[in-house]
Image: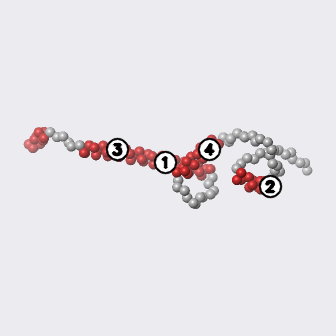
């Protein structure tokens, strides 16, 4: 058996997941772990990073407007969240269109009320012609 040449790999992630990742890699016996000494180089973001970032901003904005609840459902994936955001955006657009329609109706009714509040000026002499008919 011939030994396989080792390659260095830097894994970066949140500290909250560090122990879980180390335990899993150790259990799978897929790599030797050594403490890293030196500066970390940041890589290039994935192509969809900007879209994901915008989705997170949208999600946080929506969440900030929702009332707090104690029941938090786990297990959402990115596609579900993006689909939900699209549905919510559509509902918001529908509600805005409905609001605009109602505001237009309200303005029309206000104009009708203004018209009806003004007394109608009729020349009574012109009504004499109707008496003879």
Residue 107: numbered disc: 3
Q: CA distance from mark 2 to mark 4?
A: 32 Å
Residue 79: x percent and y percent? 61, 50
Q: Seen from this angle, which residue lies furthest right?
A: 1
Q: Residues within 10 Å of mark 3 (few under 14, many from 20)?
A: few
Is any part of residue 28 visible from this angle? no
Q: Earlier in the sequence, mark 1 or mark 4?
A: 4
Position of 107 with respect to 54 (left or right) is: left
Find out whether the residues at labels 3 and 4 contact each other: C-beta distance under 8 Å: no
Q: Earlier in the sequence, mark 2 or mark 4?
A: 2
Q: CA distance from mark 2 to mark 1?
A: 48 Å
Location of mark 2 (residue): 26
Location of mark 4 (residue): 53
Residue 129: x percent and y percent? 10, 40
Q: Residues within 10 Å of mark 4 (few under 14, many from 20)?
A: few
Badge 4 marks a residue whose secondary structure is helix
**Pick the front one: 49 or 79:** 49
């Amino acid at each position: 058996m011939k030994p396989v040449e080792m390659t260095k790999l830097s894994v970066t992630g949140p500290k909250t997941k560090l122990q879980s990742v180390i335990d899993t890699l150790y259990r799978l016996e897929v790599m030797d772990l050594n403490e890293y000494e030196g500066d970390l180089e940041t890589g290039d973001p994935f192509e969809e990073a900007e879209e994901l970032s915008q989705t997170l901003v949208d999600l946080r904005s929506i969440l900030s407007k929702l009332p707090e609840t104690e029941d938090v459902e786990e297990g959402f994936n990115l596609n579900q969240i993006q689909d939900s955001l699209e549905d919510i955006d559509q509902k918001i657009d529908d509600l805005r269109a409905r609001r605009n329609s109602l505001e237009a109706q309200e303005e029309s009714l206000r104009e009708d009320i203004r018209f009806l509040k003004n007394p109608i000026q009729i020349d009574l002499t012109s009504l004499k012609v109707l008496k003879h008919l």
